[in-house]
Amino acid sequence: SSLGDKAPRLPLWTASHALQQLCALAAELRSLWAGAGASDDACLEDTEAICNMALVELGPRLEMWRKRVRNFEEAIEELTTEIHGGILDLGGQFTMEFHEAQQQQHLPYRQLPLLQRLGADIKEQRDRGRELRAERARLLAALGRPPTEERRTVPDLTAQVEALQRELSGRADEVEQMAKAIRAIFDALEIKPADDTDRAIAKHGSCFGVTDEEHTKLLERRVFWEAQQRRVVAA
């Protein structure tokens, strides 16, 4: 370019004393070119020589910073994959926090620690979710129900497990009360049960099953024997 054109500005750290000295020397060189009537070719030759020396120093520094950014980006990519899986595993929990972290994608050094903290939180919740799903499976099996692979948030899983625990506890109490009532009818009517279900009920100290099927069967037997008792009393 000619000496009359505006010189390009370098986007470097303006507080650098070395940069200030370089700018002052460049301004002096430009003045000297003008004073000496330097040709465009001469100005270009000087500029090329100076820039080539700068490029030798700049290359390794650029590569160092490129590597740092790549390291951030690779770590972010790996974390993002893990987080996606975690959010899916947790039924959508942490979706909002992930989107917030994604807002910093233009600044990897800020985004990475956000994702690291989020990943740690998700891992903790996934571990808790696995424990809750195992407990849910145990409770469903105790109630005679098929397992489910339904994915839920940890709060939802916690509520579901607590509800199943209450149901199982209540079922056990209800079964025991029904069994006692039926045994009392056996004693009152002086009956020796012949039916397998009735014999199981008659065994004092034994725990009749609490599955849905066993509960329904026990309920049917209670209704049957209560009706039998009413007929005997009425007779």
Image: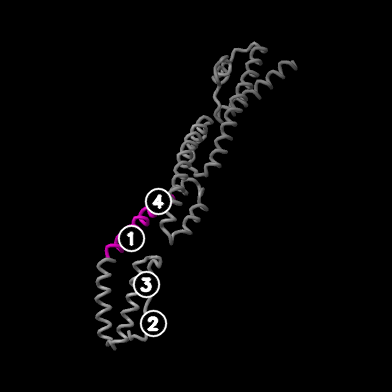
Q: Which mark is residue 10?
A: 3
Query: Contact (CB < 8 A) between labels 4 and 3?
Result: no
Amino acid type, mark 4: Leu
Quarter that holds the N terminus = bottom left
User: What is the spatial separation of the Cα atoms under label 2 and label 3, in whole angstroms?
Assistant: 13 Å
Which mark is nearer the camera, 4 or 1?
Answer: 1
Nearer to me, 29 or 64: 29
- Is residue 212 shown in magenta? no
Instruction: Name the residue rendered at 72%, 19% in the picture.
Output: 230
Marks 4 and 1, the one that precedes in the sequence: 1
Instruction: Name the residue rendered at 45%, 47% in the picture.
Output: 117
Query: Contact (CB < 8 A) between labels 4 and 1?
Result: no
Residue that badge 4 annotates: 79
Nearer to me, 204 or 77: 77
Residue that badge 2 annotates: 6
Q: Which mark is residue 65?
A: 1
Amino acid type, mark 2: Lys
Marks 4 and 3, the one that precedes in the sequence: 3
Amino acid type, mark 1: Trp
User: What is the spatial separation of the Cα atoms under label 4 and label 1, in whole angstroms?
Assistant: 21 Å
- Image position, residue 32 (x, y; %): 30, 83
